[in-house]
Image (spheres, rainbow, N blue to C red):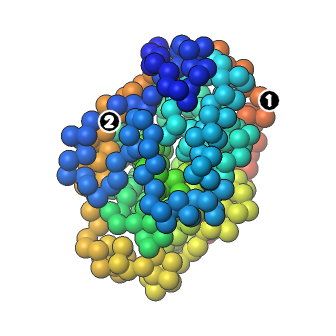
Amino acid sequence: MFNASPASPSQPMADQHESIDLTSPPVDSSAAVGFSWFPAPPPPMYSCTLTPELVHKAREELQEKPEWRLRDVQALRDMILKEQPNLRTRLDDAFLLRFLRARKFDYDRAMQLLLNYHAGRKAWPEVFHDLKPSTVKHVLDLGFLTVLPQPDPSGRYILCLRPGKWKPNDYPFVDNVRALYLTLEKLIQPEETQVNGIVILADYTGVGMSQASNPGPFLAKKVVSILQDGFPIRIKAVNIINEPRIFKGIFAIIKPFLKEKMAERYVLHGSDLRSLHKNVPCSVLPEEYGGSAGQLDLCSWSRVLLGCEEEFIVEFCQPDPLEGVVLPDAMLFEGEARGQDDDSFRGLRSQLYYCY
């Protein structure tokens, strides 16, 4: 069970919510030694860490008014306590701000996103059970994903995915999803990421039929649903490079689940690095992608995550946050028809073979 912390003045209703941890997980500052390239999370007692430029950007793009910020957080907190009193969720200012920023300070949409965030854990227990960095070290060592040390000129960190590094015989595909989720959880902690968003760079070198057909529409739908509707992060661009002919079939699996706005953010560059450099400057890219930022370093991000083991144990290795919670009918993942997905996959599988 979660232990309640003393209520702060901005949390007047917290004493009615004894099963909830009202504070952020403790952060071991020593774990960040040597990882200074990645920003630290906000302090337990919230104090804005945004620069004046980012405060202005948040006002213009996210409808965030500094003078109303804590009032908006309190409004969302009150909604949670009133509408979902049994929900075991963090209620601290820094945590709730992630959801408000991701939904441009629309209380109802932020509340729905928070419920989706927790519903995703219940719908996909094999991803979230015992979720901590040490359990995905093999994924990080393989080089399936990493985060580039330097953000782009817009302040967005670049998540680099290399699906061709994974083979179905290596380990279950769900382990890749676990590593991806932990990475997103770490990326979203700094306030600058909440405002700027992130960029994804996906290198499809080495992707063949075995990787393309393994997840299938059912898993693809879950991954897309979590990224679009179940996680408080802004994905501003998805750059695909070195995609093989088979990618047409892969994208055919993913696209039906993408919202129009997200689908428009996918940019396919092929092997044309000059095209990539128009979207992601050479100064932040490693040499492998025609950049000037040195060789691709897989160890730095791995150390960042592995150094936060205790933090993630507090965050994820706890009782089911939805136990005893009654969710609305139209929640994330509700009404999924696995049989229908499998039928559609058979048709897509033949399409993949044709492309390949």
Res 332 quadrant in image: top right
What residue appears at the point 69 percent right and 29 percent down from the top-left corner? 79
Residue at (39% x, 31% y) in the render? 25
Picture quadrant of residue 308: top left
The residue most toward the bottom is 274
- Residue 262 position (above or below residue 337): below
User: Residue 323 versus residue 5: which sits nearer the camera?
Assistant: 5
Q: Is residue 86 left or right of residue 170?
A: right
Can you tell which mark lies on residue 190? none
Q: In the rendered structure, which disc, 2 or 1, sits on the residue that comes first in sequence?
A: 2
Residue 8 location (% of width, % of height):
49, 25
Amino acid type indicated by mark 2: Val
Q: Is residue 307 visible?
A: yes
Please state, as top left, top right, bottom left or bottom right, where the C terminus lies in the image: bottom right
Disc number placed over residue 329 in the picture, else none: 1
- Specify whether 66 is left or right of 145: right
Is residue 211 among what the camera can see? no
> Which element is circle 1 on?
loop
Residue 351 locus on image (x, y percent): 67, 63
Name the residue at 27% across, 36% down: 28
- Residue at horizontal 37 percent and vertical 28 percent from the top: 313
Q: Estimate the spatial distance between the alpha carbons at disc 2 and disc 1, rounded to whole Å.
A: 37 Å
The spot of residue 77 in percent (x, y) is 62, 31
Q: Which residue is mark 2?
A: 27
Badge 1 crowding class, 10 Å Cα cut-off, few under 14, some 14 to 19, many 20 or more, is few
Q: Horizontal and vertical percent for residue 161?
A: 43, 59
**Position above or below: 275 against 267:** below
Q: Residues within 10 Å of mark 2 (few under 14, many from 20)?
A: some
Q: Nearer the viewer, residue 320 or 151?
A: 151
* SS assignment at label 2: loop
Q: Amino acid at mark 1?
A: Asp
